Image (cartoon, coloured by chain):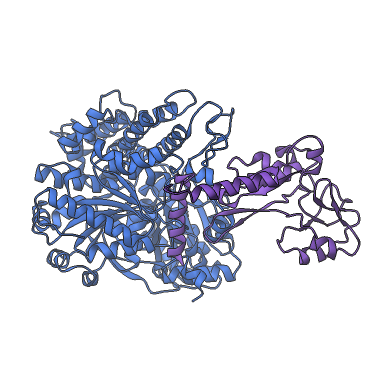
Chain colours: A purple, B blue
Amino acid sequence: MKEVVVHPERCVGCMQCMAACASAHSRSKNLFLASLETPRPRARVHVGVGLYNEGFPNRCRHCDPAPCLLACLPGAISRNAEKNTVFIDPNRCINCASCAMACPFGVIRYHEDFTAPPGKTVAVKCDNCYERQLAGLIPACVEVCKSGALSFEEKADAMKRKTDEVARTVSAGVAQVDLAPGFTLLNAIKRQQIELAR
Amino acid sequence: MNDKYSSSTITEDGRLLLKKMEREGVESVWDRFQAQLPNCGYCEMGLSCRICVMGPCRIDPFGEGPQRGVCGADADIMVARNLGRMIAAGAASHSDHGRDLVEVLGKVAVNEAPGYQLRDVEKLKRVAAEFGITADGKKPNQIAAELSDAMAEEYGTRKKELTLVKRAPAKRQEIWRKLGVAPRGIDRETSEMMHRTHMGVDNDWKSLLLHGIRNSLSDGWGGSMIATEVSDILFGTPKPGVTKVNAGVLKKDQVNIIVHGHNPVVSEMLLHACQDPDLLKMAKDKGANGINLAGVCCTGNELLMRAGIPMAGNHLTTELVLATGAVDMMVVDYQCIMPSLGTVAACYHTKMVSTSDKARFPGMEHQEFHPENAAAKAKTLVKDAIANFDRRGEVFIPVESVECMGGFSVEAIVGALGGTPKPLIDAIAAGKIRGAVGIVGCNNPRIKQDYGHVTLTQRLIENDILVVDTGCASVATAKAGFKQSKALEKAGPGLKEVCGALGVPPVLHVGSCVDNVRILVLASALANALGVDISDLPIAGAAPEWYSEKAATIGVYFVASGVYTVLGPMPPITGSMNIVKLLTEGLNDAVGATFAVEADPEKAAVLIRTHIEGKRKKLGLPHMQV
């Protein structure tokens, strides 16, 4: 089964995943029209700011066992084994915030959503683009990420790739390969600026 | 003091006012900067392209995602196109500012600009002669009319080269001609850049960058140079004078009017209106002890240079000064005026007025100034400011102002030297002064306000390097007390001796950001006196806190004129290491100078000192190991 894998070292902080996520979870599924909808669709992936102003796409890990699921008293949170996805049922959610308190990653938000009863604030988080997957599409955040910070692949493939990457860096006589020297240069300057301000 | 304020600015007035703004829930430029983080890496690297609607496109810097835009442009082309348009925008801004001054000159010539006059007729004649206009028997108005026409033609000229290119040393002009980058028309080069960067035109990144050089030269030796010269003719060539800087220049008991922007056309008329006896009486009747005109940003520099008007602050101070609650009116023209100012002003009693037909802002009253109505309009505005005086709430003026000497036009510097650059050359040759550095540019919330300017300046003057500065850099060092005779204590022994003998501070305020051309003229004068090229001189440029497109253009015309230039913030070019390499190494073969990027001003100082000593060695002057 394919899953979303995050590669933080490749995040360039463009936040396109956020816009794509909000649009994918709208009535219209169209970025422009989505921006006009009520309730306004919101992203379920959140790009955070690191110590050196670098981006990091923070999304639900769909933990197993999931602390949010265990903490949910009305039983609004469930696991879909087929897609390894933790779902929140907006009809059952009582907006008590227990799940957010239990979540170690801070990925649960509370707001209105077009799938919930009108006017009701509910817990909202990543659903691995379940609907899109049923339609044969990959998750919206992965589709829109052009720097490879988000991929949709078999976990085993991702691990193998990472293992090989690490193995290549320790091959005898091979110098460290810089995949994007320009990005490294830019980050070095930014890091210096931030350290100077501190 | 809370760390957050200290990491935003090194200035005491800035820290105190920022704290006040936060307490009062007023959003600042630093808040908005934080809200933008993380910045988009594609945009920061120059790897996003919005030029056509087959896109928008972006290129994956890691090499796995898309490597070309829809049109086929690779990273080199994309970065070059984006940089080219940045240069074009910067050149357009300063050169269009120049055009506005040429228009005023033309109106003054036919007496259609009441209140304006030809303050420096000698300079008018001198500049006119450069344009082939003879003065014999003509009245100044006639010369002004002819000069204004000749300058207007430079914008759309069909000549081979702009007239003022002749001011550069002959060797430099030859380099430009050989490279094919001598600018042909001010508007032409900007217009051609927009054309070349349209989809499917110039797709050789090197040729695009060469045109970038030509475009920047059309500003540095064209539009900007015209702006400075005409400003001198209309408002007087600056002479050294003493004034005050920082937010402490605002007066609790007076009507405070702040001018903000870049073009002296509006602010000069306000200056006259503030001295009008009727209006002064009106202010007195309102209970104010006078009318205090102060500046921020480069309009402030224009007035500081020529009339010794006090300066309240630079770019990142423009919101903060409003939080004093003491500003009765802020009058803006154009460039670098944050659209947030109207919102900040709404939290206090400040009345905001925009004046240019091409620059409007939310939350500001628009009172359009034209040469025909400027004098009358200025009086109306001052009246409105006086009327606003008693609407003030609590006033907080955080610090005492600092003394500052300004007004160092090239004419004034040469004058201080006794009419010839020779004493300066002798001091450099003897090694008392190792060299000179132009520190220019803005503030940028990426960098602790003024830290880059002040640290670099300190390191240079203590090593006997003369600093000339402009724009927001010049305000930064003025606030830090580098522009007073006391500052000689901070200078090395040689620089202290020479500046002490001349009665000037170790850091010379040469004007607003458009006045960077004064540095080009001064460098040319030194090079010509020695019979060498600008790139042979022990000089350098630096923009430690730059943010704007104008600054990018200035950087390029500095380097293209042969001045090694160190930038603080990285321009959006790292998406193409070919272009990074060309700008930081390759340009040396083409124009005898390069860029360097160094975020740490301590290290930038070492780079610059190494460069200067290297040039001294090549000139056969005493040199040392840095």
Q: What x and y, as percent, mark residue B25?
A: 61, 66
Q: Quadrant of the C terminus of chain B?
A: bottom left
Q: Is residue A145 left or right of residue B394?
A: right
Number of dots carrying numbers: 0
Q: Is residue B587 left or right of residue A139?
A: left
Could one spot residue B131 in this view of the protein? no
Residue A109 in which image quadrant: bottom right
Q: What x and y, as percent, mark residue A134?
A: 82, 38
Given residues B123 and B617, the one toward you in this image is B617
Residue B292 in which image quadrant: bottom left
**Position of B173 relative to A108 (above/below):** above
Q: What x and y, as percent, mark residue B143?
A: 22, 35
Q: Is residue B499 left or right of residue B583?
A: left
Q: Is residue B17 left or right of residue B228?
A: right
Residue A27 in which image quadrant: top right
Q: What x and y, as percent, mark residue B488?
A: 21, 69
Given residues B65 and B1, the one toward you in this image is B65
Name the residue located 39 percent from the left edge and 59 percent from the top edge.
B295
Given residues B626 and A117, the one toward you in this image is B626
Could one spot residue B32 in this view of the protein? yes
